[in-house]
Image (cartoon, helix red, strand yellow):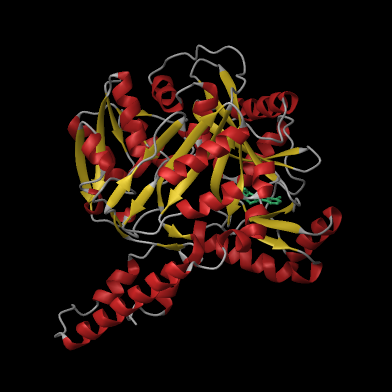
Amino acid sequence: MKKVLIANRGEIALRIVRACRELGLQSVAVYSDADARAPHVREADEAVRLGPPPSAESYLRGDLIIEAAQRVGADAIHPGYGFLSEREWFARAVRDAGLIWVGPPAEAIAAMGSKTAARTLALAHEVPVVPGTTDALRDAAEAAEIAARFGYPVLLKAAAGGGGKGMRVVREASALASSLEAARREAQNAFGDDAVYVEKYIDGPRHVEIQVLADAHGRCISLGERECSVQRRHQKMIEEAPSVAVNAELRKAMGAAAVRVAKAAGYVNAGTCEFLLAPDGQFYFLEMNTRIQVEHPVTELVTGIDLVQWQLRIAAGERLPFTSNIEPRGWAMECRITSEDAANHFLPSAGRVSYLRLPGGPGVRWDGGIGVGSEVSLFYDAMLAKLIVWAPTRAEAIARMQRALDELTIDGLETSREFHLRVMEDDEFRRGAIDIQWLERRLDSLVGAPAPRELMEAAAIAAALLAERDRARRAPRTARPGAAEAARDTLPEHQPWARLARQQGLRGE
Ligand code: ADP
C-alpha cells in the first residue's frame, strides 16, 4: 500500500491524512465545490474534485470516487465514518476494482447491517441482547402479545434502522397499533424496508461501547470501553474513556462479548460493539458499527494505540502485535464542537470562520476540519471539530476540558462551546451520574435563558434580515423560475430547520 484515497471530508479526512503521513503513505483527498479550499484538501498530497456541494452529487458518488482512485493511481480507499463507510455495495465495488478497502469485508458489513440479523448472531454466541424478537413483527396482534410478555414500556425498532429513525417508545397497549404503523412508515421512507421488531425498553441505561481491532490472521482484541451516554436525540455529544460504571471485571466480560460478536461476523479491521448498560449492571448488545467511530480518540489517548494507523496497517495485511486485552491508563474526554446554537434548540448555524483560536498546552488534542476563512455551509453534518483531553483522573480531565474550552474561540458562527462549558460545570455530570436520558432531562437548566447580550445580537440580526428583505423586494427579479424548488431539494433531510424551510416553501419570509 502506497497511496490512499480518502472518501470523506472535514475532521476525519484530515485525521486520515495525518495517519498516512506518519506511515509514509501518500494521501489523496476528494472534495465537493463547497470544500475546494478546506483543510483536508490543502493538507493531502493530492486532491480530486467530485462535484457540486450536495452529498448525493459528491461524497456519495461511489462511482466517481473509484474512478478518481484509479486515475491517480491510489491502491486503497479509506471511507472514514458516515457517507459510504457502511455501504456493503461500495466495499464490494472497491474490492472488485482491485483496490484495498480500509475497513471490514463487505460480508461483515452486511452481517451487521440488519439489527435483527445482528441480534440473532449475538444470541448464537452467548452475547446478551435486549429481550425482544429477532424476527420482524407480522402485525399489531403479534406485537401486543409479545409486549404483554415483556411488560411496558417497549421499543419498536426498524430492522434496517440507523440514526434513531424508525424507533418508537410505546408506554401502553392502547398506543401499540398506531406506533407500529408509524414506525413502519418511517422505516419504509428512510430505509426502503418496513421490517420492525420489538424490544423491551430499558430505563435509565448508559451507552457503553467496546472498541475492537481484528487483523486478517485471526487475532481480535478489545481496547476497552467508551462511555457515550451524553446524548441528545440519540446523537452523542460528549464521550469518555474509561466509564465510571465499568470496573476491570465488567470490562473483561464486555470485551469478551464484543470479540465473540466480531469473530462470529468474520470481522477484520477496527469496529465497535455498542451496548446498553442497565443500572443493575446487566449489559445488552445493541449493534456493531463497522467503521471508525467519531469518538475513537478517547480510546487512543487511554491506550496509546493509534486506531487509524492500525486500520491502514491491518488493511495492508499486518499482524496485530498485541496479545492481551489492553487496560486504560488515565482518563480521556471528548466534546463534539458543532455549528449549532444550543441556546436556540440547537439550530444549525452557517457562516465564515473569521477568527479561530485553538486551545493548547498539556493533554489537549484538537481534531478539526476548519480554519480561518472556512465557509461552514448547511450541506453537511454540523460537527466542525472534536476537542479531546487526557489527564490522570476524571476530575482532572474535566478541569482540563474547562480550561481548553475557555481557550477556544471561534468567531463567525454559533458553536456548541458554551453548552459544553455548562455541562462541565454540572453537578450530576461531574459525579458521573449520567445515563442516555440524562441530557434531555437536564437540557433546560443547562441551556437556560439566552443572555441579554445574545438577545441584543439576535435583534441586530433580525433587523439586518428585514433590511435585506426590503432591499430584495425593491430589486428587479433575477431569480430563475424554479430556483426556489431547486434550492429546497438540496436541503438536508432530517434537520428541523430544513423541514421548516421546506414547509414554508422557502419563500424567504
Ligand atoms: P440506531 O442504529 O438508530 O442509532 P440503536 O439501536 O443504536 O439505533 O439505538 C439508538 C439509541 O437509542 C441508543 O444509543 C440508546 O440511547 C437508545 N436505545 C436503543 N435501544 C434501547 C432500549 N431497548 N431501551 C432504551 N433505550 C434504547
Location of residue 119 by image quarter:
top right
Q: Residue furthest bottom?
A: 474
Q: In this view, does 489 lie above or below 32?
A: below
Q: Could you tell me which quadrant the N terminus lies in?
A: top left
Q: Can residue 435 be seen in this view?
A: no
The residue depicted at 33 percent of the width and 55 percent of the height is: 411
Q: Can residue 313 be seen in this view?
A: yes
In this view, the residue farthest toward the front is 452
In percent of width and height, residue 16 lies at 35, 32
Residue found at x 42% / y 28%: 308
Q: Nearer the viewer, residue 334 or 40?
A: 334
Res 251 → quadrant: top right
**How many discs appear?**
0
Q: In this view, does 109 lie to the left or right of 261?
A: left
Q: Is residue 450 left or right of residue 67?
A: right
Q: Which of 84 and 327 is in front in this view?
A: 327
Looking at the picture, how far across and down is residue 267, in whole percent? 54, 27
Residue 6: x and y in percent read: 31, 36
Q: In this view, does 425 lie above or below 13?
A: below
Where is residue 31? Give x, y as percent: 25, 46
Give the image quarter of residue 455: bottom left
Residue situated in front as seen by the camera: 88 or 249? 249
Horizontal side, residue 167 vs residue 319: left or right: right
Residue at 75% over, 50% down: 202
